Every structure is written in structure tokens, then in C-alpha cells.
Image (spheres, helix red, strand yellow):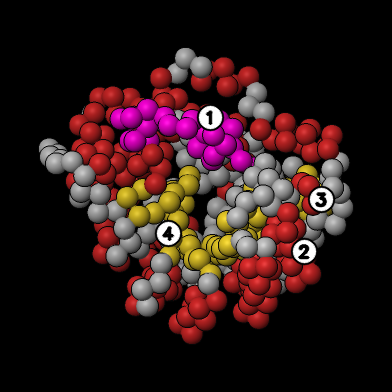
Amino acid sequence: MRIESFFEPIVYVTAKVTHGCNQKCSYCKVDSLSGKSMKMSLETAKRSARLLIENSGFSSLWFNMHGGEPLLLPDEWIEEVVCYARELAGKHSKEIRFPIATNGTLLPEERLLKLHKLGIDFSMSCDGPPKIHNIMRGRGATVSRTYRLFRKHKIRCGIMAVISRGNYDKMKLVMDWYREQGIRSFLSNFVEAQGRGVHNHLLTAREMYESGVQILGHMCETDISVSNDDMLRKVAWFMQGRKNGDALACPNIECHAGRHMVAVDMDGSITTCGSADTSDYLLGHIDRDIDEDRYKNVLHRFHDKGKWIIRCFDCAARQICSHGCTTACNKSNDYRENMCQYTRMIWTHLCEHPEKARYIDNIISGRKAHYG
């Protein structure tokens, strides 16, 4: 398959611009220890963007600069890539967006305003107020100051929380603090088995469940003053059933990794997904045509659920199940099992307390709601 043809169905490229990071979060990847790690060349970044823009069959595209910590790269590097890609997209009558996920420690005010003017879409990791954030990450006060800069200048910033041993039993406190900071919604992921996170960091199903009940309770008790994407989706599916459940999407059995989205590593290697390390699932290289047999075999190996999927067929909880992120589940059977049990426990909780789901559903739908 010509490399140009490979990119025809691709809408989202995650450019792994560096594996380096200026922090040493206790549950993060081993290769993110050094801020001096190798960084993607401008040539590789531009080649990746060009393949996406010139060949994709979609008119709205995403070029995500990801790490490690992507803001270890200088502003001049980011600006050259963004300007190049935006100009090229314009020539092809396409729109392109530039998400950057950051730990929030390298964004002084001047830099934030410069990158915002450039058109960067920001998301930032924040596991709670500084005291809680610091349990697993550190530099919580800096992260808090950075978010205040976003608010000061009315710049949108998505918030991502890793639910870990440091905060799973403190989610109501975390969400109270979010509300005080003006954070109205957040994405969350349970800590995965990667890097230092492999060792004694995975949450049990019961710990996952504790965090979920606290998140659901806070949403009910405060009229969804702070919403959580995953819990909103579970509630919607519980009340209304799954919609478009066969589509390729992260929460469904089959996702879009390697099909509509790919990752490009610093050396130009193409892998299935940029959400975590997927170097074991090498699809090809941006400077070479794709071996179709290899591509099919790697994609099958990545998406194959194994015999455990049989249990899903007669499980009532599949109605709200996200089936676990493939990148995380493929690395750890324990993680997959804990996610499964957690989902069953949340399903049982909703069945025993349908008033919670009904209350949230009514608020979202604009209907009169009463709780308690």
C-alpha cells in the first residue's frame, strides 16, 4: 500500500514529539525521566502533517503534539510546524487543529498567550488541589497558578485527571476544588500499567468503584457543578441505551486506533495509537510504503480481545461498559479484570439507585429535576 493511500482514512495524527519530561510522576513511563531526551525533527513533523493533510479524505483534521511533555520543545519549533500545516491545509480547503496535552509547569503567562495566539488547543493534567496533586506528581502549586492564567485570559483548557492511589478516595474533594477554580468538567483515566506504574500502582476494582461512586455522588449533590465525561456517558447509556454502539470509538468494543487515528514517533515510525506506548504495534514508517499483510496482522493483534470477550455477551453491564482502553488492557490482564469488575459494580450501583441516573439525565435534558 502506498503511504499516501494509507493516510486516506486518517483524521487524527498524534505526533510523539518527545518522550522526555521535566517531571517524574510516580506512575508514569520510565522513558519520561529526562528532559534531555531526543525530540522529533522539524522534517519528521512536517512530513507527518503533509501526509495527513494532502491525503486524508476528511476536511477537519487534528495534529496532536504529544509527549512526554511537548512543551519541552521551543516555541519556534511549534510555530514553524503549526504555520506550515495550517498554510498547507488552507491550500487543500481543509481545517486543522493542534491539541497539546501538558503537565502545566512550563507555561508562564507570556508563553501561554503566544501559543494561544498561534491557535494551540490546550489540555492540562491536574489530579486535584496542590496537596492531592503532589501525592503522585508534584508541583501542584505551579499547575494551579497555570490554570488561573487560563481563567484570567479566558482561554479554554481541558482538564485531565489520572485516578490513582493518591486521589481515588478523595474525588469529592477534588471536584470541590475544581468547582472553586472554575473547572466545570474533566476527563479521567485510571492509572495504567506502564513504566513505573507497573509496580504496585494499579487500583483494585473496589478502589475504582469508590472513585466512581464519589464522582456520581458529587454530580448529583451539586447539580452537576462539575461533570465527568466517563460518568456522564455511563449515565446516558444507563438511561437511554447505547447509541451508535457499533461505531469505531474509544468507549466501544472496536476503536479507531490504526484505522482513523495513528501515532507517529520521533523517528517517523507509525503505530496504532498515541494514548500510550504502542511501539509493540508498529504499522510502518512515514518514509516507506506500508506492507499490507503486516498492517493487517498488527491491527488484528492490537484489536483482538481474546477469549475473555465471551463474558461480555450475556453481561447486563455491557450497556455502560467502555471495554477498557486497548492499549492499557493489552499490557495488563489485572487492569482489564479490574476494569471489568468495576463496571459491573457501577452497573449494580445504578440499578440499586436509579434516582441518581434519572436526576442527572433530567438535568442534562433540561427537564425539572429533584434529588434526595
What separation in Å lies between label 3 and label 4 (alpha carbons)? 35 Å
Say which residue label 2 marks.
Answer: 47
CA neighbours of label 2 inside 10 A, class few (<14), some (14 to 19), many (20+): some
Amino acid bearing label 1:
Asp
* Rendered residue at 33%/25% (across/down): 348
- For marks 1 and 3 on the same chain, the one whose residue lies earlier in the sequence: 3
Along the viewing direction, whichever of 143 and 371 lies nearer the viewer: 371
Q: Secondary structure at mark 4?
A: strand
What separation in Å lies between label 4 and label 2 (alpha carbons)? 30 Å
Say which residue label 1 marks.
Answer: 246
Q: In the picture shown, does residue 208 fall above or below 23?
A: above
Pointers 3 and 4 in contact (CB under 8 A)? no
Say which residue label 3 marks.
Answer: 3
Give the image location of residue 120, x and y in percent: 53, 70
* Rendered residue at 29%/53% (across/down): 226
The reply, left or right, for residue 88 in relation to residue 160 is: right
The reply, left or right, for residue 126 in relation to residue 62 is: left
Specify the principal SS of the magenta part: loop
What separation in Å lies between label 3 and label 2 (alpha carbons)? 11 Å
* Rendered residue at 64%/56% (across/down): 14
Along the viewing direction, whichever of 94 and 218 lies nearer the viewer: 94
Assign the C terminus to one quadrant of the image: top left
